[in-house]
């Protein structure tokens, strides 16, 4: 059984907060109760948290993978460029990888590496102009 935990992008502070237990107030606020940096914390984020779930897997460097992470992964079906870049999403009860070439790769035994996330590093998903 995989560990259930979350993190949150705090839009008010523009920072990622690691948390284990998000508690929603039924409106638009979230209270995060968890353990970070060896200190218990209880934080209220008003109107501005994007909650992302740990997918239960780690990358090749033993880093936990969450929704919203940007990953490099190898797709053996791509003959021209097997190393792809995409971001982790959740849809229809499945964790997926969305990339420039394919939306909704079903998660297989990809060897991947987390290189950032869509909130702190959106530039990593920008498509390079071939003339540059």
Image (tube, rainbow, N blue to C red):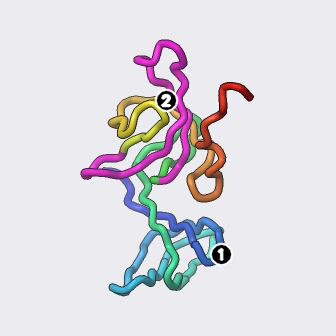
Tell me the number on the disc at residue 111.
2
Farthest residue toward the left? 92
Q: Earlier in the sequence, mark 2 or mark 1?
A: 1
Residue denoted by label 1: 13
Tag 2 secondary structure: loop
Q: Where, quadrant-wise, is the C terminus in this rendering?
A: top right
Q: Is residue 15 left or right of residue 45?
A: right
Residue 27 among those drawn in magenta: no
Residue 93: where, in percent of width, then height? 26, 52
Tag 1 secondary structure: loop
Q: Is residue 63 left or right of residue 37?
A: left
Residue 69 among those drawn in magenta: yes
Q: Nearest the camera: 100 or 19? A: 100
Query: What residue is drawn where x is 25% and y is 51%?
Result: 92
Query: In the figure, 94 relative to 21: above or below?
Result: above
Query: In the figure, 47 relative to 35: above or below?
Result: below
Query: What residue is drawn where x is 57% and y is 45%?
Result: 63
Residue 31: where, in percent of width, then height? 47, 82
Asked which quadrant contains residue 18, the reply is bottom right
Q: Do labels 2 and 1 touch, CB within 8 Å?
A: no
Mark 1 neighbour density, 10 Å: few (under 14) some (14–19) many (20 or more): few
Q: Nearer the viewer, mark 2 or mark 1?
A: 1
Mark 2 neighbour density, 10 Å: few (under 14) some (14–19) many (20 or more): some
Residue 83: where, in percent of width, then height? 55, 24
Main SS, magenta residues: strand
* Boundaries of the magenta span: 68-95
Q: Nearest the camera: 121 or 5? A: 121
Question: Disc 2 versus disc 1: distance between alpha carbons?
Answer: 33 Å
């Amino acid at each position: 059984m995989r560990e259930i935990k979350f993190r949150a992008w705090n839009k008010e502070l523009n920072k990622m907060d690691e948390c284990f237990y998000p508690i929603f107030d039924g409106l638009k606020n979230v209270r995060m109760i968890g353990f970070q940096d060896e200190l218990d914390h209880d934080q209220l984020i008003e109107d501005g948290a994007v909650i992302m779930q740990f997918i239960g897997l780690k990358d090749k460097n033993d880093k936990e993978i969450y929704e919203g992470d940007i990953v490099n992964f190898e797709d053996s079906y791509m003959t021209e460029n097997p190393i792809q870049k995409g971001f982790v999403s959740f849809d229809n009860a499945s964790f997926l990888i969305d990339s420039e070439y394919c939306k909704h790769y079903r998660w297989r035994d990809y060897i991947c590496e987390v290189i950032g996330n869509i909130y702190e590093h959106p530039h990593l998903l920008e498509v390079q102009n071939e003339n540059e």
